[in-house]
Image (cartoon, grey):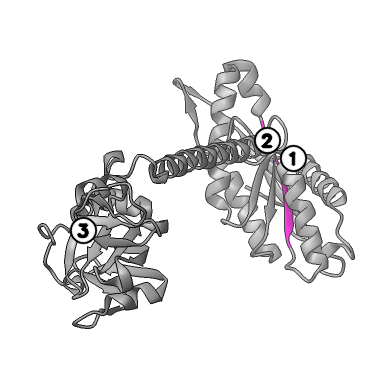
Amino acid sequence: MIAAGPDGAGRGGSGGDDGRQGTAVPLAPEVLGRLMPMFLWLGRDGRIRAAGPTLRKIVGAGPLTGDPFDAHFLLGRAPAAPGLATEGLVRRGRLHLSLRANPAAVLRGQAAALGPAGGHGVLLNLTFGIGLAEAVRDFGLTEADFAPSDLAMELLYLREAKDAVLAELKALNQRLETARRVAEAEALTDPLTGLANRRALEAALTQEVAALARGGAPFAVAHLDLDHFKAVNDTLGHAAGDHVLTRVATVLRAETRRGDVVARVGGDEFVLLLRANLDPARLTALGSRIIARLEEPCVFQGNSCRISGSIGIVLSASYPVPDPDRMLADADAALYGAKRGGRGRCTVVLPPGQGAAPDVGV
């Protein structure tokens, strides 16, 4: 038995309480185990005399009784020396232990001398500290493995509840962020073709002008208007018109580069913000290629939908200080110049001093 005296120090003994001051109160290890499920009683020789049920469970090496302390435990970062002086544990104050069989399992605690001058060894009361959650998981512990007065499980439940709330808040934030991105994308996207809309084009063009003012690369704006599209809508219906517009979007995506912006800005009007290959001859070839593909046969429900396109292109190099609205207006004027020239044509407006670009028809 372990007996406690009136001064609070424990001492070995088995006598009963006869009412005299100084008489020991016996405390069986089984009783102590209910109060302190992770206690460890060491004799003066450093051998284990008793251990709490939870401590025995996590060590998992038999009853432990009679085994040397250092057969199962590491003190600090180094094993305890043979012939451990138990009074040294008391002098250490706070203890940091780990299990030899599972060094990741860290225990914390404190030692108290038993009996006069520690004549009956020391009593260690151990806990898991901040590693509680991991210990409960790794060793399969339950509420029954802790003293009824121990708040460890309540704290663990609070931690789990907090983690659950934080996880739900994180998931909610992710859903809100996803919804925000979807809403922003929808606000900048033409619902029929999936291309950028006028709002997105204006934002991209404003950013491009600002970048150019900071030394960025030049760019071009191309305005495309479909020829004969109204006839398709009037004769075959809006479903056929939508089919044609979707096909036009496919052509424009295929003919432009990843860094370009392709936007539908009206019923059958499209604007391209081109960021590479700004040589007038290449731009003219691009316009001709787009028109040629638009004029390829397009069938909807057995009916031929024949269209073409007219394109006007302006370059940022044509302006001392490019202005988005001015460039769009000039591209529109070039577009209608191409229409007046017979439709199905591409007109590139060159910067001053570079002569006139050919007005190319397909």
Q: Which residue is mark 2?
A: 187
Q: Residue at x 56, y 30 (%)?
A: 244
The vertical placement of 296 against 218, above or below, is above
Tell me the tag on residue 88: none
Q: Main secondary structure of the magenta part?
A: strand
Front position in the image: 123 or 329:
123
**What's under tag 1, amino acid-wise?**
Arg
Q: Give the mark toward the camera: 3 or 1.
A: 3
Q: Under tag 2, what secondary structure?
A: helix
Q: Is residue 224 magenta?
A: yes
Front position in the image: 277 or 310:
277
**What's under tag 3, amino acid-wise?**
Gly
Residue 93 in which image quadrant: bottom left
Please report the bounds of the magenta region as a residue range. 219-227
Q: Under tag 1, what secondary structure?
A: helix
Q: Confirm whether residue 294 shows in the render.
A: yes
Q: Which of the two discs, 3 and 1, labels the residue nearer the N terminus?
A: 3
Q: Which of the two discs, 2 and 3, labels the residue nearer the N terminus?
A: 3
**What's under tag 2, amino acid-wise?**
Ala
User: What's the distance in space between the residues labelled 1 and 2, CA to CA?
Assistant: 8 Å
Indicate the position of residue 357 as horizontal and vertical percent values: 76, 60
Q: Give the mark toward the camera: 1 or 2.
A: 2
Q: Which residue is mark 1?
A: 199
Q: Quadrant of the N terminus?
A: bottom left
Q: Are marks 2 and 3 in contact (CB under 8 Å)?
A: no
Tell me the tag on residue 13: 3
Left or right of residue 84: residue 231: right
Front position in the image: 100 or 244:
100
